[in-house]
Structure formats: structure tokens, C-alpha cells
Image (spheres, helix red, strand yellow):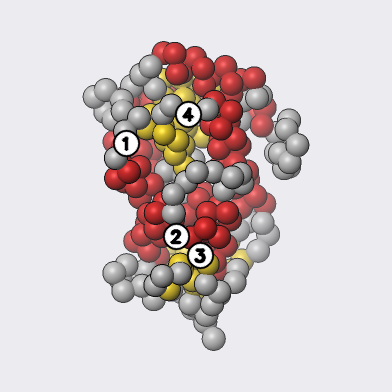
Amino acid sequence: MPAGGGHYDLAVKTILVVDDEPEIVRLVRDYLEHSGFTVVTASDGPAALQTARTRRPDLVVLDLGLPGLDGLDVTRELRRNGTVPIVMLSARGDESDKLVGLELGADDYLTKPFSPKELVARVRAVLRRTESAAHHAAVVRVGGDITLDADRMEVTVAGRRVELTSTEFDLLMTMARQPGRVFTRVQLLDAIHGVAVDSYERAVDAHIKNIRRKIEPDPHAPRYLTTVFGVGYRIADPG
């Protein structure tokens, strides 16, 4: 257990690694197992979905460039059936693929070639965010319609439950705890990542777009999660 690991036992966490390159799978598996994780693997999209259903991993490391059913399709299916955290791997230089993945609900990404140690750090950070959000014992309200229950990691809008990923929930809760405060993209990146990362600030925009789609009556004219142009975002002060 590394220092600063929090109140959870990483040894009991199961990670699903999905990549069609055997050398990458072997390398990632070795580093994750050395760090105390249980690892299961898949080499294509259908196998990844089947393994996710049967093994119920705590996090998925998912390559975008899979044959047949690609990583974006796998992400769509995983998000349709749950909120398991996803760390994407991509060899593609086009940032639009990463943004699409984040909009679909992925929690983080790494571009190939990547450092295995960096990947382990990202996995730990995403799991830490998930666990810390689950252990908060607080209910936060946004306006009169939205309730965030940190203890259950649940969000309801006008009494209707909506599904947010752990990263989306953490982002929304970070802002909701301080309504009216303007958060820059850098501050939000710092809040949702437990380690120093090279994530670009547009990743925050992708997450915000996804949150608005789920909680706003009209995502194109947001009432709760507003943009402060040239600065960042804030949750509207109910007062």
C-alpha cells in the first residue's frame, strides 16, 4: 500500500485491462499486479464487455484502437450499463477522440507511448476519487431541484435519479460545495486528479458538457452550471 492511499485496500481492487497488443497488456498487468491489484484482461471489445459483466471490475483500462468493436463503442456500452471508472489509452494524435471518450463518460486518458508508473498513478487517483466521494457523509443541494448525496454518490434532479461517473460527480460536488465561486479549469483539474497530470484543460469542458446534458433542463442554456467566459465555471449561488 503506497503512502497516501486513503482508507481503502488496493489489493482487493480488480482492474480490467483491454488492449489488442499483447506486450502492452503484459506490461500493464505486471505493473498493476506489482502494485497490489488483481488484473483480468481482454484483447477485443466483445471480450471486454463479457469480462466486465462476469468479473465486475472496479476500473477498466481501455484502449481506444481495438479491432471490430472499438474503445468508444465499448465505453458507450459500459456507460449504458453502469458507472465503472474508465481510464482510456490512445495512440491517436487527434484530440477529438479523447474528447469524445471523455464526453461518453471516461474518467481519464493516457496517450501511447505512456509510462507504466504514470498509468498506475492515474488508476490510483481515479479509484481514490471514487472512494473519497463515496465516503463523504454530506448532502448538497443546488437550487431547489438538484440534490447530491455524497454518502451514496447519487444525484437527483427534481426527484429523478441521474447517473454520473465518479469524475463527473466529483467535479459537480467540488463546485456545489462552494456555490457562486468561479473555478478555473486548472483548479478543477487539480480537484478531480489526485496527482499532477498532463491533462489538457479542454478535458474539463468535455466533462462539463456531459454533466449539463444530465442535470440541466436545457443544456444549451444552463441554469445551474454556468460558464464564466475567459475564466471557467461555477454553480449558481441559490441566494
Q: Tag 3 or tag 4, which sits nearer the N-term? A: 4
Tag 2: amino acid:
Arg
Task: Tell me which residue sits at (38%, 63%) in the image.
Answer: 212
The percent position of residue 158, horizontal first and vertical second, equals: 43, 71
Q: Tag 3 or tag 1, which sits nearer the N-term? A: 1
Graded by Cα atoms within 10 Å as few (under 14), some (14 to 19) or many (20 or more), the crowding at tag 2 reads: some
- The residue singled out by tag 2 in the image is 161
**Quadrant of the rendering where the C terminus is positioned:** bottom right
Secondary structure at numbered mark 1: loop
Which is nearer the eye, 2 or 80? Answer: 2
- The residue singled out by tag 4 in the image is 114
Marks 2 and 1: which is nearer the front?
1
Q: Tag 2 or tag 3, which sits nearer the N-term? A: 2
Q: From this viewpoint, is residue 82 visible? A: no
In the rendered image, the residue lying farthest to the right is 3
**Quadrant of the rendering where the N terminus is positioned:** top right
Q: CA distance from mark 4 to mark 1?
A: 13 Å
- The residue singled out by tag 3 in the image is 184
The percent position of residue 120, horizontal first and vertical second, equals: 58, 31
Q: CA distance from mark 3 to mark 2?
A: 28 Å
Secondary structure at numbered mark 3: strand
Tag 4: amino acid:
Phe
Graded by Cα atoms within 10 Å as few (under 14), some (14 to 19) or many (20 or more), the crowding at tag 1 reads: few
Which quarter of the picture shows residue 215? bottom left
Graded by Cα atoms within 10 Å as few (under 14), some (14 to 19) or many (20 or more), the crowding at tag 3 reads: some
**Picture disc at residue 93:** 1
Tag 3: amino acid:
Thr
Q: Are marks 2 and 1 in contact (CB under 8 Å)?
A: no
